[in-house]
Image (spheres, rainbow, N blue to C red):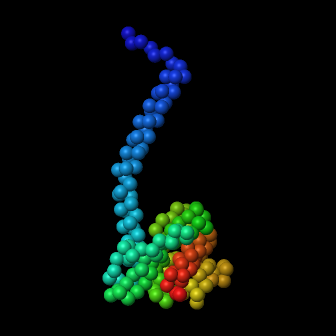
Amino acid sequence: MAKKIKSNLLTMSVSLFVFCAVMSAALGYVYLVTKKPIEDAKLKKEIDAIGQVLPAFTNDPISEKIIIEDQKLEIYPAKNNDSLVGVAVKTYTDKAFSGEFSIMVGFLPDGTIYNTAVLDQKETPGLGANMTNESFKGQFKNLHPEKNKISVKKEGGEIDAITASTITSRAYCDAILRAFNEFKKQYKK
């Protein structure tokens, strides 16, 4: 007959410690195994976004990336035969309904918006998540933040807000203006 282990605080504490140590090691292993594929997928998404928001280029904008740490922005200059054809800016806003989201904005050398792409968002499906639809983000194409008012029509701007998602629409405008202000600092001296 097996001997019954006496239950007390010490045995419960040791059991809990061993269980937590094993689970922590397992979680650490899963993190190590998945870290590289997650980083690769994120980089691929950024590379695809750069291709979407800029005209044709011949250089490698990723290798020429400029990081603006105090603003949490990344700038990717695009060149065709050493001539600047556009600049992609990875930007963000923390004014969204569900917190923060990030987008890539492409500017032509004169500051005109070429295109935008959503990188990461956690907005409500069917509402704020509609920012990924071309019917919304396409409104920004060919606008110039110094010549056009980049805000929702409700505030006198040129952008039709997403139905029932004015906060998300305002946040998208905020992210674009944040990107443009840094673009202007870097390229419009």
Report how many numbered discs are placed on residues in the image.
Answer: 0
Q: Position of residue 167 (x, y in %)?
A: 62, 69
Q: Position of residue 52 (x, y in %)?
A: 40, 77
* Image height of 52 relative to 112, above or below: above
* Image height of 102 relative to 158, above or below: above
Residue at 49 percent of width and 89 percent of height = 110
* Image height of 109 relative to 27, above or below: below
Q: Which quadrant of the figure has residue 29? A: top left
Give the left or right position of residue 167, taking residue 23 as reference: right
**Residue 139 visible:** no
Where does the N terminus fall, quadrant-wise?
top left
Give the left or right position of residue 92, taking residue 46 as reference: right
Residue at 40 percent of width and 64 percent of height = 42
Quick one: 51 or 85, which is closer to the camera? 85
Quick one: 27 or 164, which is closer to the camera? 27
Tell which residue pokes out farthest to the right in this image. 155
**Residue 186 visible:** yes
Give the left or right position of residue 148, taking residue 109 as reference: right
Q: Position of residue 25 (x, y in %)?
A: 40, 40
Give the left or right position of residue 25, taking residue 103 as reference: left
Residue at 35 percent of width and 83 percent of height = 57
Q: Position of residue 96 (x, y in %)?
A: 59, 66
Tell which residue pokes out farthest to the top in this image. 1
